[in-house]
Amino acid sequence: MTRIRWTRGAHEDLVAIGEYIARRDPGNASRFVAELMDRTLVLRGQPLCGRILPELGDETVRELIHKNYRIVYRVVDVEAHILTVFEGHMLLRPGAIGTRREDDRRDEKDDET
């Protein structure tokens, strides 16, 4: 079974998304953030189920889609590192994900899904 690890940057993305939604619909903000987190649970049994990130073409960097959000992750051995979460109409920010697997680990929080 694959472990799911959230990087600090991905956690910060979730906080920003929640704060943005809360400005318009406070009751929906925490529910939607929970949906985004729950969407990654499929990676426990199927870490390669997301499509390869088109901007990079690297087979280890993939994405899941939830509504209009992109959840970008990297498959590393028996772990899936959630790297960033952002609106689907936006392009991947330069520097939003590390270029090496070590960058993922350095930026990790201890939280797991």
Image (cartoon, helix red, strand yellow):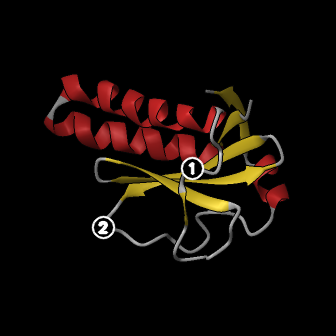
In contact (CB < 8 Å): disc 2 and disc 1: no
Considering only order in the chain, which callout, 1 or 2, is on the residue closer to the N terminus?
A: 1
Q: Position of residue 41 (x, y in %)?
A: 55, 31
> Which mark's residue is nearer the viewer, 2 or 1?
1
Where residue 71 appears, x then y in whole percent? 48, 51
Is 60 rendered above or below residue 79?
A: below
The residue that appears at 32% across and 38% down in the rendered structure is 19
From the viewer's perspective, is 77 left or right of 35?
A: right
Q: Secondary structure at mark 1?
A: loop
Q: Amino acid at mark 2?
A: His
Which residue, as the protein is rendered here, is positioned at the far left? 24
Where does residue 96 sit, x and y in percent of width and height? 58, 64
- Which residue bears the numbered disc 2? 89
Q: Secondary structure at mark 2?
A: loop
Q: What residue does disc 1 label?
A: 49
**Left or right: where 64 falls relative to 29:** right
Label at residue 86: none
Q: Quadrant of the N terminus?
A: top right
The quadrant holding residue 16 is: top left
